[in-house]
Amino acid sequence: MQALPNRMARQLDRLCEVPAFARGWFRNVVMRRALTHYGADSLNFLQVSSSAVEIGMKRQSGQSGQSDLAQHLPAAALNLLVETASSTLLGMNVRDDCQLRLKALSLNFLQPASGNLRATASLTPEQRAFMQASNSGEVRLAVSVTDQAGVTPVNCEFIWAWTAHSPGKNQSA
């Protein structure tokens, strides 16, 4: 069964109509509209499809400071990176009449990250088909993260759930 693309997937499918030199810029514009926190961060959507999402993050120079606060900022930024990768991927696959909810998140920090980060989330064809066929359910998703040196600084796993939702009285269709 061929999965029907939702609104976000349809917008990103139009990338083939954009000249090659402008596709990265256009993809980031589409994603900024979908993810309101995106503009304030240094996230770069490297690949976005219904089967995989790859996002890069440039570390800011101020994040490597010695204060306690500066040492905690990379953990928060890494959390933002992996959650954005997983939620974007699932947002590309959940039906338009369903709503996603993060059920569980596990981040196990293995070592400090060095340099820029890259997160990749992917779904199997079976997981994608299950999301399209079910009114509700949950999916377990691992997100791989590598730093500039090619090292994995953290192991990440998410459990996302979705349920069909009907618009409320005050919402327009």
Image: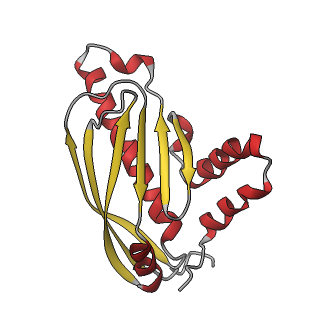
Foreground pick, 24 / 35: 24
Name the foreground residue: 167 vs 37: 37
Whether 66 is drawn above or below 115: the answer is above
Classify residue 67 as left or right of residue 93: left
Check the image and report above or below for 121 versus 79. below
Q: What colour scheme does the image use?
A: secondary structure
For the point 30% across and 33% down, the residue is 151
Could you say where residue 139 lies in the image, as x and y percent from the top left?
A: 32, 70
State the image quarter where residue 86 is shown: bottom left
Q: How many marks?
A: 0
Residue sitting at 43 percent across and 58 percent down?
A: 87
Q: Position of residue 102 (x, y in %)?
A: 33, 62
Residue at horizontal 50%, vertical 70%? 93
Q: Residue furthest front?
A: 150
Image position, residue 140 (x, y; %): 29, 66
Would you place residue 24 above or below residue 12 in this image?
Answer: above
Q: Quadrant of residue 123?
A: bottom left
Q: What residue is shown at x 63% (from left), y 79% (from top)?
A: 173
- Direction top: furthest residue: 66
Q: Nearer the viewer, residue 67 or 16?
A: 16
Across and down, in percent, residue 43 comes to 51, 38
The picture quadrant where one finds residue 78 is: top left
Closer-to-camera residue (144/159) = 144
